[in-house]
Amino acid sequence: MTDTSVPQQQTVAFPTFADIEAARETIAGVARVTPMETSQFLGELLGSPVHLKCENLQRTGAYKVRGAYNRLAALSPEQRAAGVVAASAGNHAQGVALAARELGIPATIFTPVGVALPKLQATRHYGADVVLRGHSVEEALSAAKDFAARTGAVFIPPFDHPAVIAGQGTLGLEIVDQVPDVDTVVVPIGGGGVIAGIALAVKGIAERQGRQIRVVGVQAENAAAYPSSIRAGQPVTITTKPTISDGIAVARPGELNFPIIRDHVDEIVTVSDDDTARALLVLLERAKLVVEAAGAVGVAAIMSGAVRDTGRTVVLLSGGNIDPLMMERVITRGLVAASRYIGIRIMLPDRPGQLARVAQVISDAGANVVEVLHTRHGQGLVINEVALDLSIEARGPEHAQEVIQRLHEVGFRPELLEH
């Protein structure tokens, strides 16, 4: 996966609380102070009030513009004239492109060939020169660094830089401004830029106020580099697996981010893709919020029980840039995970009327058949037998079980299928 860290031999000062306060002044008028919503549903699940920091409603659809603008604003006139370059398949690209446009700096963004069309179009809309290179972020990153070496453009890392961390840390200041009595802040983790900044900010405020504010990080279980790194006492590279939370699928913690997170984050938990898909569905249905998978892992952690009740809680919804095609797939997965969309197979005698009987039982149970496959051709079938595969909409686990039970009661033997 992506290696976007500061070189180990380079000595870089950690950002301070004062740097974060200065960053808030720097980005004012460019980054919005995003809304803070309350979720009664999540509050009832957790046992304490839950608030949602809606950075999915930020300009460019994610928090990344905060750190990007703070970094670009610090460039010298000579550096601005040389331009900036970044590599990204998503939110970092848009954040750098918008920040560069606002500051009048030429920007070149390298993205993989398969980048989602909405993200590609948005990055170009913000005025960046977008170069499609390679089939992975790693290849795009290599091309961006070559471009920087060849042209003198300043490479802008997505998370591993003090000015970037300070810019993201402005979220921590806003969180405490909007929820002064916050006890716990739950934040997604990829490379670690946003949680490092938030942790520095809220811990700094808590120290001044003589109280505690917990910070909990959440990673996708298929791309969780931080737990193993914390155990090892240093950043380690893992082999990531595919995850719907691709925005936080980073194989190695940032060299600058890691010690901040080690020293200031109280707990790191992981969630599955099914957990995240359910969370996205809840955010759509209950909060009327469109959030990308990486931005919803904090909600997933509450719903799965990975985050325990430690008082008034703020969850960062870090971004909302989800491809409509991916949204369709994730919604379906969320429905399956919530047992609101189930697949069953029934073996039937090959004679007229059997399909109608099955459909009537399902209808009487109040469920809806949305897809049917009726075939005589399949392994395991005997002569005069057919397989009936059905996709059914149900109202949840109890209703799905009721439908299965009704089919058993009239003599059918349904088997659950995996979607």
Image (cartoon, rainbow, N blue to C red):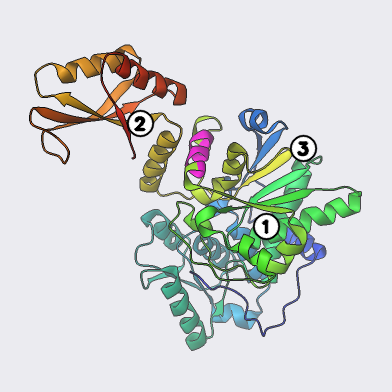
Residue at screen point 67% across, 57% down: 195
Q: Nearer the viewer, residue 377 or 81?
A: 377
What is the magenta segment's predominant secondary structure?
Answer: helix
**Residue 157, disc:** none
Q: CA distance from mark 1 to mark 3?
A: 19 Å
* SS for dot 1: helix
Mark 2 neighbour class, 10 Å CA radius: few under 14, some 14 to 19, many 20 or more? many
Residue at screen point 73% across, 32% down: 48
Q: Please indicate whether residue 133 sits to the left or right of residue 31 in the image.
A: left
Query: For the residue marked with disc 2, what is the amino acid?
Result: Ile
Q: Is residue 307 magenta?
A: no
**268 lies above or below 4:** above
Q: Nearer the viewer, residue 389 or 200?
A: 389
**311 lies above or below 41:** below
Q: Are marks 3 and 2 in contact (CB under 8 Å)?
A: no
User: For the residues carrying marks 1 and 3, which lies nearer the camera in this image?
Assistant: 3
Q: Which residue is mark 3?
A: 311
Mark 3 neighbour class, 10 Å CA radius: few under 14, some 14 to 19, many 20 or more? some
